[in-house]
Image (spheres, rainbow, N blue to C red):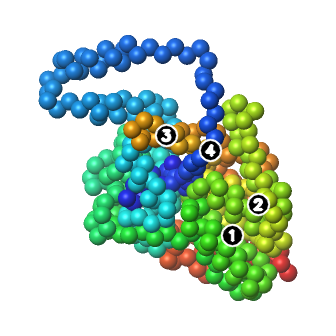
Amino acid sequence: MNCLYIGAYNRGFKEGARNISYTYIPNIRSINTPVKNVKLDFNLFAEVLQTIATKYYDKASLNTEKLMEGAIKGMVNSLDDPFTEFLTVKDAEELNTELSGSFDGIGAEVSKKNGKIIIVAPLKNTPADKAGLMPQDEIVAVDGVSTYNLSVTDVVTKIRGKKNTKVELTIMRNTWDKPKIISIVRSSINIPSAEVPMLPNNIALLRIYNFYQPLPSQIAKAVQTIQTNKAKGIILDLRNNPGGFLDIYTDIGNYFFADNTLLLIEDYEDKQFNKEYKTFRDGELKDIPIVVLINEGTASAAEILAGALRDNRGVKLVGENSFGKGSVQELVDLSGGNQLKITVAHWLTPNGTDISKKGIKPDIVVKLEQEEDNGSYSTITLENDSQLKRAYDEIISSVK
C-alpha cells in the first residue's frame, strides 16, 4: 500500500500498509496492454520548456533535471491515484530500507485519503505510538508548513530525519475542536511483525503488525507457541496493520487454511490476466477457532486476510470498518535508476469482494470506549480495550 512507514523514507502496504503497500507489492508481472487510439503530442510540452529556457528571468537557477522530474510527477499526480507515484533513485533506495523493517523515523504509517494526509497506523512502541497518534489522524502541517496540496512524498520528506531530532506535527482528529501540535523525537525504528501473548482460558492473542520481511520467521515462532500451549482459540489482531508484500501474505495464509484454499484474486481491467492465489498445504491453525480484530488502520494485505478468513471459514470480524486499500501496485524500473509505482489491479477477497475505498465492515461493530487512551499499543489490555474484550467473549463462546 502506498502507506509506508514514516522514517528514513515513508509514505501509503504499502497502501500494506507502506503505503504502503498500500500494500506495496513489487515483482508483479507486467501487462503490456496499451490504451487504444491515444495520440501523444509533445509539441506543447516542448513549447513550454523552450519558453521557460528563453524567457524565464532567473535563467541561472534553471535545473533541467528538476524541470523534467516536476513534469513527470505532475503527469503521474494527474491520475488522482494516491498509490501511483514516481520514485527517484533516492526515493527507491530509502523505500527498500524501510521495507526491511528497520529505519530511522517516528514509526507511523501514512497515506492520502480524500485529499488529506492521514495516519493509517502508529507502529507498536515507536515515537508515534508513544505520542498518541491514532488511525485517521490528519497531518495538517509539518514543522508549521501546511500539507495542503502536497503529495505523500512531499510530506514524508518533511517528516523524515535523523534519530534524536525533533519534528512537530499539527494533527487534527475528528473528536477535536481544533488541531493540536504534537512534538515527536525521531528514533531508530525496529518493527516487530508478530507476537502471541496468551490470554486466560488458554486463548492465544496473535498480533500481526505488518506483512513485511521479518514476518515469516516471527509467525513461525508464534505458531509454535500456539501449538505448544495447545490454544483452544485464537484472537487474530490485525488492527493498525498496514499490509505489506504479496508473497509474504500468500505464505502466511497457509497457516490458516486447508490445502488448495483460495486466498485472494488479483483483478485486472482485462479479465484474462486475473490471477488466483491458493494455499499449497494444510495449515497448522486451520482447525482452531478464530475471531479477527480490525479497525480503520487495517489495510491491504491485512484486509484481504480478514476477508479470506470470513469468506472461507465463516470467521467473525470484530471492531471497526477497515481502511479500504484494495489496489495492487507494480514497481516498474525506469531509466537512470528511477522507478514508477503504478496501480495495475485490485485485490478481491475469495468471494470476489472488492475492498477498494469502502474497506471491510466487521460482523460485530465495536468502537473503543476510551479512544484517547487506547490509541497506543502500550495501553491496550483485555481490561481496558472493549474491542479485544468483545472478541475474547466471542471466542470463549465458540470454544465451550
Label 4, secondary structure: give it. loop
Q: Residue at x 79, y 68 (%)?
A: 283
Q: Residue at x 53, y 43 (%)?
A: 331
Residue 333, disc: 3
Point out residue 208 in the picture as x, y percentages from the top left corner.
62, 68
Residue 311 can be seen, yes or no? no
Q: Is residue 360 left or right of residue 14?
A: right
Judge depth for marks 1 and 3 and give the one in front: 3
Residue 209, disc: none
Q: Amino acid at mark 3?
A: Asp
Point out residue 324 in the picture as x, y percentages from the top left corner.
61, 49
Point out residue 217 in the picture as x, y percentages from the top left corner.
62, 72
Q: Is residue 264 left or right of residue 22?
A: right
Check the image and name the residue furthest to the front: 336
Q: Residue at x 74, y 85 (%)?
A: 228
Asked whether disc 4 touches disc 2, contact meaning CB atoms under 8 Å apart, the reply is no
Q: Is residue 256 left or right of residue 93?
A: right
Decide: few, some or many residues near mark 4? Use Cα within 10 Å; few <14, some 14-19, many ≥20.
few
Q: Quarter of the image holding residue 55?
A: top left
Asked whether disc 3 touches disc 4, contact meaning CB atoms under 8 Å apart, the reply is no
Give the mark nearest the N terminus, 4 or 2.
4
Label 2, secondary structure: give it. helix
Decide: few, some or many residues near mark 3? Use Cα within 10 Å; few <14, some 14-19, many ≥20.
few
Decide: few, some or many residues near mark 1? Use Cα within 10 Å; few <14, some 14-19, many ≥20.
many
Q: Amino acid at mark 1?
A: Leu
Disc 4 versus disc 2: distance between alpha carbons? 24 Å
Asked whether disc 3 touches disc 2, contact meaning CB atoms under 8 Å apart, the reply is no
Residue 28, disc: 4
